[in-house]
Amino acid sequence: MKRLVSWNVNGVRAVVKKDFEGQIQALAPDILCLQETKAQDDQVEAALAEVDALQGFHLHVSSAVKKGYSGTALLSREVPLSVREGIGVAHLDQEGRVVTAEFEDAYIVTVYTPNSSSGLKRLPFREEWDLAFAQFIAQLDAQKPVVVCGDLNVAHRPIDLARPDANYNKTPGYTQAEIDGMTRLLEDCDLVDAWRAHHPEEVRYSWWSYRGGAREKNVGWRLDYTLASARFMARVTGTEIRNDIFGSDHCPVCLTWD
């Protein structure tokens, strides 16, 4: 059994001060994927070196050129066969948004998809990203199954956010362009939204605004996903959204497989 945990930590140096040790022990990952590390490579390494539960893990980091922004990391008990940063498109790879680790049975890809930003001013960049990322995943999937995890910055269906009507085509993460980008990723790459496949009608969120007591009121969005190649899904034994875990405005999502 292998267990993948994916978590947008909203700053790795901040989260390690919030009982991260105990949370990682409780989550018990074999592979841990982090998004929005908001730190340079050496700072991520230093922060995670303090976490006893991660001793012995192999760490791979991708940091943004801009300091204190974006960033991803992938840690694994097993040594990957290969690791790469980015998606191979230079101007899209300046923000440290992707780490891909190859293992015997699958590629594990952690991604922090660009937010379209206030006023949707980054939506054109986001649309370009979505196309390029889908092409990258399709190339991987042609070689072996893929598991994509991370903050995809989109609520794919109305059930995936608390107030769909009020946010549709107005709020980053719930425009038709972003929804279509997610649909394209699933369909063109033959991926399955693993949690939704296992919980077709359940309402559960993974991100809440810090404003207005949104988490206490459960006014949230499901922005964090585990996606798996369709031919891999028969091996998937469990999916979780761990909204009992605090420390970030996002909560971890988990995938287990035989």
Image: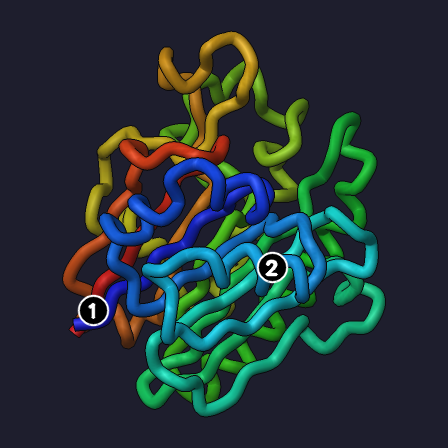
Q: Nearer the viewer, residue 101 or 193?
A: 101
**What's under tag 2, amino acid-wise?**
Val
Residue at image position (60%, 68%) is 61
Residue identified by numbered label 1: 257
Q: Position of residue 142 (x, y in %)?
A: 47, 86
Residue at image position (80%, 47%) is 124
Instruction: Indicate the colouring scheme.
Output: rainbow
Q: Quick one: SS at disc 1?
A: strand
As displayed, is residue 208 above or below residue 28?
above
**Would residue 93 be seen by someone viewing this image from the given angle?**
yes
Residue at image position (61%, 65%) is 98
Q: Is 210 left, or right, of 253 in this rendering?
A: right
Residue at image position (32%, 63%) is 4
Q: Position of residue 196 (x, y in %)?
A: 29, 46
Count of all numbered marks drawn on residues in the image: 2
Instruction: Find residue 14 and report its image quarter.
Output: top right
Instruction: Find residue 23 and report its image quarter.
Output: top left
Q: Position of residue 137 (x, y in %)?
A: 54, 73
Residue identified by numbered label 2: 44
**Would residue 131 be seen by someone viewing this image from the given angle?**
no
**What's under tag 1, amino acid-wise?**
Trp
Instruction: Find residue 32 and report its image quarter.
Output: bottom left
> Is the residue marked by circle 2 packed among few (<14), some (14-19), or many (20+) residues within 10 Å?
many
